[in-house]
Image (tube, rainbow, N blue to C red):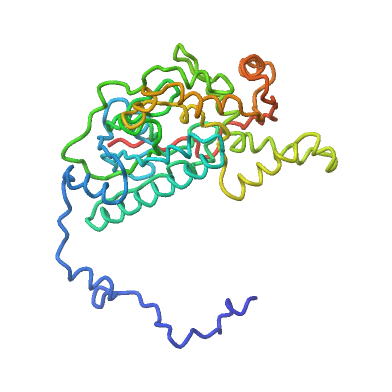
Amino acid sequence: MSDLNRPERQWNPLHVPVRRGTPEQPHPTVAAARAQPAARPRPELDADWLRELCLAAGVDDVGFVALETPGLEGERDYVREALPGTRALIGFCLRTSRDNLQSRSTSAANRDVATTQELAHEAARRICLELQRHGVRALYPASGLPAEIHRFPERSWVVSHKLVAVAAGLGQMGLHRNVIHPKFGTFVVLGTILLDRPVTRYAQPVASNPCIDCGLCVTTCPVGAIHADGGFDFDACYTHNNHHELSNFAGWVEEVVDSADAADYRRRVTPSETLAVWQSLSFQPQFRAGYCVAVCPAGSDVVGAYLTDPEAHARDIVEPLRRKPEYVYVDADSAAAEHVRTRFPHKVIRHPRRVDVPEPALDPVPEHHDE
């Protein structure tokens, strides 16, 4: 038995013994709390005050939406599982560094996405702490990861930041399935805060879609996931862009396990791929191709330079990404594989090991909340 667990172990001389209070002699903390005047919680939050609070915390734009807003039906049980009694949502965004995301250097883009996500978390935390000081319950889910990973491959996120952003007037979904802010374009990280109080005034979705239908995301996507007719191949996007995450990572683990020796492993996984896995594990999962964001000229802060000199936009941003030699991860005999062969023959096709993750058996869906 550890010395720390021995019954005869003496407490430190500075230790004050634990004492359970009684009705006649309540615990000091309880007595002090009861002596305070009863707090008068705000029945609803003033929208102007709340907006100023959010902007002061570091967000670049913000909107408020009731949880009962049409279009958010699928969010309610998940949201109220995280924070029972949720009545309203704060949708907010922070700008990313546009030149980082437009760079041919993927590491520069990933660095700024990670930094902006952490800034979003810090801003959300400051907002929540201030709201809690005013007696409001407030919770911020992750901007990206971590997620309720035990529910993968079904829904593992607490709230859809994209749906909330659209409902809160922060933009509309573009052809590439990213939210385009009317001013900042696609160069934003989104976040959401759950509130147990209504807000005095809610936002409305923006009236027009900022997407200008330029088609640059269609021509630049290395796997052809974005279709000019509005279609979107999620599996192709996920297989390549999220190659180091979730079931794709599980596939790499199985390659390691099944390798007979180091030479066999190197036949399955190239040294640069091994280093890429290491980087994702040591830093955070790396996106392989946020090219649809990089080339998007939508948004009033962005579109001017594109309209002034579209050839420069193509020369400096679009073409370097299209020319870039790189591994592209696609399923064999898929439309994505054919797209790479015909549109990007200089890129190297790799077929990742696919792991079929079974449907979650433990806590697969949230409890239903009638409120």
- Quadrant location, the C terminus: top left
Q: Residue at x 65, y 27 (%)?
A: 329
**Compared to 29, does 255 lie above or below?**
above
User: Residue 180: image x %, image y %?
Assistant: 36, 28
Q: Is residue 327 left or right of residue 258?
A: left
The one nearer the camera, 85 or 47, is 47
Direction top: furthest residue: 229
**Compared to 295, does 131 lie above or below?**
below
Q: Is residue 39 left or right of residue 364?
A: left
Q: Residue at x 50, y 29 (%)?
A: 316
User: Residue 249: image x %, image y %?
Assistant: 64, 38
Q: Is residue 235 left or right of residue 207?
A: right
- Quadrant location, the N terminus: bottom right
User: Residue 284: image x %, image y %?
Assistant: 56, 46
User: Residue 113: image x %, image y %?
Assistant: 47, 42
Q: Residue at x 26, y 74 (%)?
A: 26
Q: Residue at x 56, y 84 (%)?
A: 8
The one nearer the camera, 60 or 173, is 60
- Quarter of the image for residue 23 reads bottom left
How many labels sit on residues? 0
Q: Is residue 264 left or right of residue 172?
A: right
